[in-house]
Amino acid sequence: MDAPPVQYVTTSDGLRIAYGVSGAGTPLLFLPGVFYHVQLAWQYPGLEPWLRVLAERFQLIQVDPRGTGMSSREVGEGHAREHYQMDIDAVLRRLNPGPFVLLAASGGVDLALDYAIAHPENIVALLLGTSGTSKVNTPIFEMLPAADWEVFLHAIVPRTRTREEANKIVELIHQASDQRNYLLRRRVLYGPGEIEAALERLQVSSLVMHARDYALTPVEEGMKIAQHSGGRFVLIDGADPWGDPEQGIRAIEAFLASLPTPNSGTSQHADAALSDREIEVLRLVAEGKSNQQIADELVISVNTVNRHVSNIFDKIGVANRAQATAYAKDHGLA
């Protein structure tokens, strides 16, 4: 499969963000963490097979956050982690995918957590690849790149890669990132103790996958991520941060299949138990609107929308917005 065409959107603070869409099916936003480039990622050893299997099963959404890939490289003064949410929000507003699966690994986990905590209603499931807590291995990931960027790039290449593959990886990283932007991004990630607290605030179902042979992040770190998030943990083979794609996709499919579905015994006329206002809210949920957007459209408070959504979920027997959307379509309400 070829790399998708590059598209652009402008953030609220004026930066141009590159994104690409490939495949069909349930939307899935992928934040690989280690390497961002909408097109060159399809040449990156270890990452390319992941993109291929994901695009075969999902509508795959790639984003180059500011300072990376084909997006604006000059991130400006006052750089902060929340700025990356502007990048994600800008792309999602353009695409309006409805409820989606969010997959992230390495440093992308921090960005994914921020989004999932702020917008749980938009997430079908949160899938977290190899990552660690509290900026694990700070000497390698912060001190070394600050001291010698070239040595750092060679140090993070898995030892299982051939010399040719290693040289290609380093060459691709040179095209997709630079020392300054890498260090800026690294410095604004969650600090000691912060990521654990964030994980415990999650309100969405999560799966943690950890590549057993990835030398820079021990398996115990993945176990901590799962423990703090309350998610399911699975070890997969591989020395890259994303692990083996075939094992990973099987774990993802099994996890998504295990999520609660609308009660099979629900009456086909169960929508009669919903009030007119609840049906109106359900239709807007099925359109992919957030609770705040629904509140704005109906000119009611977001707390009232929260209450309506909770009541709707209870009445129709669903656990999340994706299931509510499916219910609405099945019952002719969307």
Image (cartoon, rainbow, N blue to C red):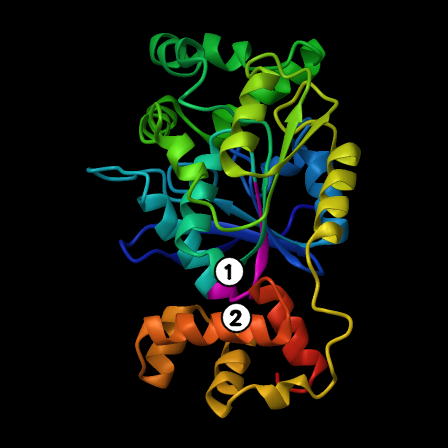
**Residue flagged by tag 2: what amino acid is it?**
Gly
Residue 277 x %, y %: 46, 88
The residue that mark 1 highlights is: 122
> Could you tell me if residue 128 is visible in this image?
yes
Residue assigned mark 2 = 288
User: In x, y percent, where is residue 18?
Assistant: 47, 49
202 relative position to 215: left or right: left
At label 1, counting other C-alpha atoms closer than 10 Å, the crowd grade (few under 14, some 14-19, many 20 or more) is: many
Q: Which residues are magenta?
A: 94-103
Q: Is residue 59 above or below residue 298?
A: above
- Which residue lies at the image location 67% right of the left edge and 75% below the top edge? 327
The quarter of the image holding the C terminus is bottom right
The residue positioned 50% from the left and 74% from the top of the image is 311
Local secondary structure at mark 1: helix
**Mark 1 residue type:** Asn
Binning the other alpha carbons within 10 Å of mark 2 as few (below 14), some (14 to 19) or many (20 upward) gives many
Task: Tell me where residue 259 appears, x and y as whole percent.
Answer: 69, 53
Question: Residue at horizontal 31%, vertical 31%?
Answer: 188
Q: Secondary structure at mark 2?
A: loop
Among the 4 quarters of the image, the one containing residue 306 = bottom left
CB within 8 Å, label 1 to label 2? yes
Task: Give me the residue at 44% from left, 64% from top.
Answer: 93
Q: Is residue 109 magenta?
A: no
